[in-house]
């Protein structure tokens, strides 16, 4: 499990990661993404999830906050950012540090 990275998202958004050596798992809907994440969580330390799927899986992804691995991070899809990934990062930073150090407005 040391250093293994994966990405879960729609097929078009994740293909570029495959070229970089990241394990890619296509999931076109919430149900498929849940199944893939359950399996990937046993093998990968870092798992990227595209924003559309991450938003749909919000409550499901919270279970990963309670353990050190895998680290699940939300990233924009090929369609661009909706800002959801930034919201999740800000929320995690505030929980961990008690202050918003990245997005201070």
Image: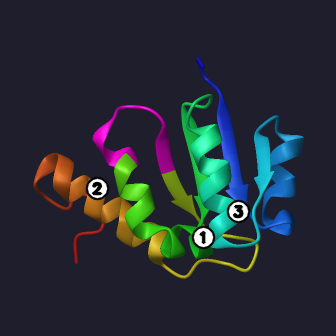
Q: Is 99 or 59 nearer to us in this picture? A: 59
Residue 30 lies in quadrant: bottom right
> In the orientation shown, which residue stands out farthest toward the left?
98
Q: Earlier in the sequence, mark 2 or mark 1?
A: 1
- The residue segment tinted magenta is 64-72
Q: Residues within 10 Å of mark 1 (few under 14, many from 20)?
A: many
User: Judging from the image, what secondary structure is the residue with disc 3 in?
Assistant: helix
Q: Are marks 3 and 2 in contact (CB under 8 Å)?
A: no
Residue 59 lies in quadrant: bottom left
Q: Residue 97: percent from the left, percent from the top? A: 15, 48
Colour setting: rainbow
**Mark toward the viewer: 2 or 1:** 1
Q: Are marks 3 and 1 in contact (CB under 8 Å)?
A: no
Report the residue at 65% width, 35% height from top. Answer: 5
**76 relative to 54 in the view: left or right:** right
Report the residue at 64% width, 39% height from top. Answer: 40
**Mark toward the viewer: 3 or 1:** 3
Q: Find disc 1 in the rendering and name its residue.
A: 53
**6 relative to 12 in the view: left or right:** left
User: Judging from the image, what secondary structure is the residue with disc 2 in?
Assistant: helix
**Mark number, residue 32:** 3
Q: Residue 8: percent from the left, percent from the top? A: 69, 55
Q: Find disc 2 in the rendering and name its residue.
A: 92
Q: Residue 46: percent from the left, percent from the top? A: 55, 38
Residue 7 on the magenta span: no
Q: Earlier in the sequence, mark 3 or mark 1?
A: 3
Q: Are marks 2 and 1 in contact (CB under 8 Å)?
A: no
Q: Residue 102: percent from the left, percent from the top? A: 30, 60
**Mark toward the viewer: 3 or 2:** 3
Q: Is 49 or 100 nearer to us in this picture? A: 49
């Amino acid at each position: 499990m040391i250093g293994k990275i994966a990405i879960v998202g729609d097929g078009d958004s994740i293909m570029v990661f495959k070229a970089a050596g990241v394990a890619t798992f296509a999931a076109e809907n919430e149900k498929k993404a849940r199944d893939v994440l359950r399996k990937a969580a046993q093998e990968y330390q870092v798992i990227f999830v595209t924003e559309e799927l991450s938003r749909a899986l919000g409550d499901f992804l919270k279970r990963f906050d309670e353990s050190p691995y895998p680290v699940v991070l939300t990233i924009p899809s090929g369609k661009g950012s909706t800002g959801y990934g930034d919201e999740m990062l800000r929320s995690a930073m505030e929980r961990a540090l008690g202050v918003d150090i990245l997005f201070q407005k």
